[in-house]
Amino acid sequence: MNFKDDIKNYQPINEQEIQDQKVIIQLIEQSPHILTRDNYVAHITSSGFIMNPTLTKVLMIHHNIMKKWAWTGGHADGESDLLAVALKEAREETGVKDIQPLSSQIASLDILPVSSHFKNGCYVNTHLHLSVAYLLICDENQPLKICEKENSGVEWIDIDMINHQYFSEHDVYLYHKLIDRAQKEVEKIRWK
């Protein structure tokens, strides 16, 4: 299966994902450069929501551009294996070598607006990230390492801290959607 089929076959869990999936599919079909940043309006990104095996903590980075704690991820840059992109970005941004997918299936589809900014001295216009996210698992005792070009911190955060006191309303929604998905995925595994 390819990334287009994976996105088309994804089963949305709510109205937001139903609508975002429709738009993402439409943009994929209309744009020859959807996997690269050559599409200045919208392009595919792949994110990893990294949790410990007990699903009580999330490994996050303090993002240099966004200036906040966030999940790992990055641009597809032409790569159609979006799980491989999520894993590569997770390893690069946290320094953790042994990160595994909880499932090879997409865990979340979201359209994320990105405000204009400067990166490496170049202006980047406002655009959309067509985010394909995966649930990843790793042992929280592995050494962490900051990736200075991407982030200023790497830290395990208790899931109880993912609330409106520390995160935006949108981030709380998104991260709790992924926490719920991880818990359901683990339950499915237990019942097999």
Image (cartoon, helix red, strand yellow):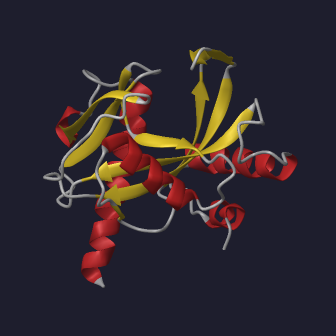
Going by the image, does 182 lie left or right of 64? left
Q: Write the residue at 30% across / 38% down.
A: 60
Q: Position of residue 172 (x, y in %)?
A: 36, 33
Closest to the observer, 35 or 95: 95
| Residue 189 in the figure: left or right of residue 31 | left
- Left or right placement of residue 150 versus residue 50 in this view: right
| Vertical comparison of 101 with 123: above or below | below
As drawn, the residue found furthest toward the left would be: 141
- Quarter where residue 16 is shown: top right
- Identify the image quadrant of the N terminus: bottom right
Q: Position of residue 79 (x, y in %)?
A: 65, 55
The residue depicted at 27 percent of the width and 43 percent of the height is 59
Given residues 50 and 55, the one toward you in this image is 50
- Residue at the limit of the structure toward the bottom, as seen here: 192
Q: Quadrant of residue 5?
A: bottom right
- Quarter of the image that includes the C terminus: bottom left
Residue drawn 33% across the image and 53% down it: 180
Looking at the picture, how far across and down is residue 113, in whole percent?
A: 60, 27
Q: Total of numbered circles in the picture?
A: 0
- Residue 87 percent location from the top left of the image: 44, 56
Residue at left offset 26%, top offset 45%: 58
Image vertical order of residue 93 relative to residue 148, above or below: below
